[in-house]
Amino acid sequence: MKVCPACRSDYGGGEVFCPVDATRLMTTSEVAIGAVDPNDPLVGTVLAGRYVVERRVGEGGMGLVYLGVHRDIDKRVAVKVLRDDLSRRPEVVARFRQEAKSASRIGHEHIVDIFDFGETARGASYFVMEFLEGEDLGRLLGRESTLEAARACAIVVQCCRALSAAHEKGIVHRDIKPENIFLTKRDGVDDFVKIVDFGIAKMSDIETDGAPGRKLTKTGMIFGTPEYMSPEQAAGKELDHRVDIYALGVILFECLAGRVPFEGDTFMGVLTQHLFAELPPIEAVNPEARVSAELELVIRKALAKDPDDRYQDTDELAEALVYALDGRLSPATALAPPAAVLPRSLRDLDEVPRRKSSRWTWAAALAVGAAALGWVGFGQTSGQRDEGEPTETRTAPAAPVEVATAPSDVPSPDSGDGPEELAPESILVHVESNPPGARVVLGDGSEACARTPCVVETIPGSTLVLRARLGKRRGRVALAPAREEHVRIELTAPSRARAKPKGTHASQRGSQGRANASDLKVPEWAQ
C-alpha cells in the first residue's frame, strides 16, 4: 500500500506518482515518520557503550533509522534498528543481518558503509552505518520530474561502479530503485551516489551453502518493487546479477521520460507488462524528452526481456552510457541483436529475401541502425520530389555517388563475337541501405519501394537514380545496370546547424536547460 503525502490518498497498485497532484507516492511507514513518538524509548540511550541515539530521522522497509553520535570521537552515525514486530521473526532477523553483511562485505565508495552490529537492551537487532546528508533519487524525481541526459547517466554510471563491486563479491541487490539511490555531496561534487538497502540482496554463499530448505530465498518467490523488476524476477525464476542491469535501465528510462516504462493498476498488472509488453519509445511517453538515438538504444538493450540480450555486466552498461553521451555506440551496444532492441516496426525487415552472404557484419549494420530508433516519420512525405525540398541546413549532403558500370566481359550485341544474345526486357536491382528500413524513390520522384531491402525493376541500358531516406538520413546512388545487380545505399545524417545568434527562438529554448544528449559528457569523477 502506498500513500500520497500531499492528498493522503491510498493506492494499492503499481502507481509511482499520485494521479491527482503528481506527488511521488510513499509507503505507509515512510509517511508515518512525520509523527515521531516523542517518548521513543530508544532516543537518549547508548548502544554498545559508544553510540548515543539522538532522534529518529527515517524509516525503511524493515527498520527505523536514527541519528546517533559516537560519544568518544563525536562522529555522527546512522543507526538502523529492526522494528519490534519483526524482531520476533527469525527469518526477518536473518535477512536484516544479511543486509549489514552484504553492504559491509563490498566496501565501495558508492555503497553505504556499515561498520557495527548489535542488539538493543530490548533484544532488537541494529547496525550502525555512515550518516548521509542529501536526498534519494526518488525524491529528486518527485520534485524535478525528469533529469537531463548527462545528469541521469552520471548517476547511473556511479550505480554501475557500485554494483560491479557487489557482483564481484557474489552479491546481487535485487531491489534497485530510485529510493535506494541516495544522492549526497562529497568533496564539492553534487549527486555523489550511495546505494542503500541491501535487505533483499542475494548472496551466493548464503543462498547456496547449508542444508536444503535453509535458504533465505527460494526459486518462485518474488522480491522487489514491481516497477523495477526484471521479467525473470517477475516470473519467480532463478536470478543473477543481470536483474540489477534491468532495474538500472528502468531508472534511466524514468529519469528521461518522467515515468517508468510499465505502469498498471495492480501489482500483477505491472509484472505482466515486464514479461510481455513492448518497451514504448521515450519520445512517445514524453515528447519533450531530449534523448539521442544512441542513448535510447542503450536503454533498450538494458531492458531486453531475455537476460542474454542485455549487457552482461554493469561495466558494459557504464561504458555504453559514456559512449552514447559522446554520440557513439560501444562494442557491446553495436552487437545487440535487432530482435532484442528494435521496436517491431523496424524489426521485420526481411520481406524480400536477402542474398545468402551478407555484405556487412551485424555490428556495422546495427551501429548505424541505432539512428533508426525515432526516425520513422519519412512516410509523411510520400510522393514529393527531393528536388523540390528547400535547400536549408536540414537538407543532407548527398552521399558519394556509386556508379556501377556494366562489366567489360559482357559481349556487345553489335560486336559479332559469338552468338547474338537478346537483351533482357527488364533487369532486377536488389537494393539495400545502411541502415535498413529506408524508403527509396526514383529520380523522377516516384516511389521505388517503401522499405529496404527491396527489389527495383529497370530497363537495360537506362540510368537508374535511387534516392533513399530514413528520418533525417539521406543517400543516393546512380547506376546503369546491364544485368541483375546488388547495390547498397549508405545513408548519412545532415551536419549540425550552427547555433543561432542570441535572442533567437532556438537559443531561448536552449536557455531553459535542455541540451542535446550527444553533446553532453559524463564528468571524469563519475567514469
Image (spheres, rainbow, N blue to C red):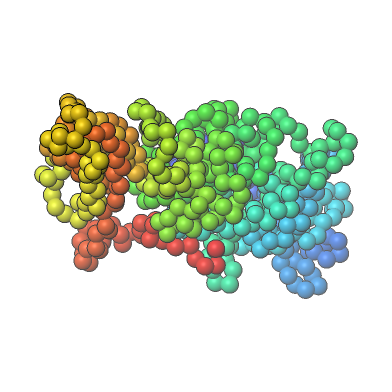
Image coords of residue 510 (percent x, y): 30, 59
Q: Considering the image in quadrants, where does the C terminus appear? A: bottom right
Number of marks present in the image shown = 0
Q: Which quadrant would residue 442 be assigned to in this image?
A: top left
User: Is residue 427 depicted above or below 398 in this figure?
Assistant: above
Q: Is residue 167 left or right of residue 322?
A: right
Query: Can residue 40 be seen in the rendering of this structure?
Result: no
Residue at x-position 20% and y-position 56%: 393
Residue at x-position 79% and y-position 41%: 207
- Seen from the viewer's position, the closer of residues 38 and 497 is 497
Residue at x-position 49% and y-position 58%: 322
User: Is residue 163 depicted above or below 202 in this figure?
Assistant: below
Image coords of residue 430 (percent x, y): 29, 34
Image coords of residue 248 (percent x, y): 56, 47
Image coords of residue 192 (percent x, y): 57, 63
User: Is residue 306 depicted above or below 158 in this figure?
Assistant: above
Query: Can residue 481 be seen in the rendering of this structure?
Result: yes
Residue at x-position 56% and y-position 46%: 311
- Seen from the viewer's position, the closer of residues 174 and 88 is 174
Q: Is residue 235 left or right of residue 302?
A: right
Q: Is residue 396 left or right of residue 6?
A: left
Q: Is residue 512 left or right of residue 221?
A: left
Q: Which quadrant would residue 434 be assigned to in this image?
A: top left
Q: Considering the image in quadrants, where does the N terminus appear? A: top right
- Seen from the viewer's position, the closer of residues 379 and 267 is 379
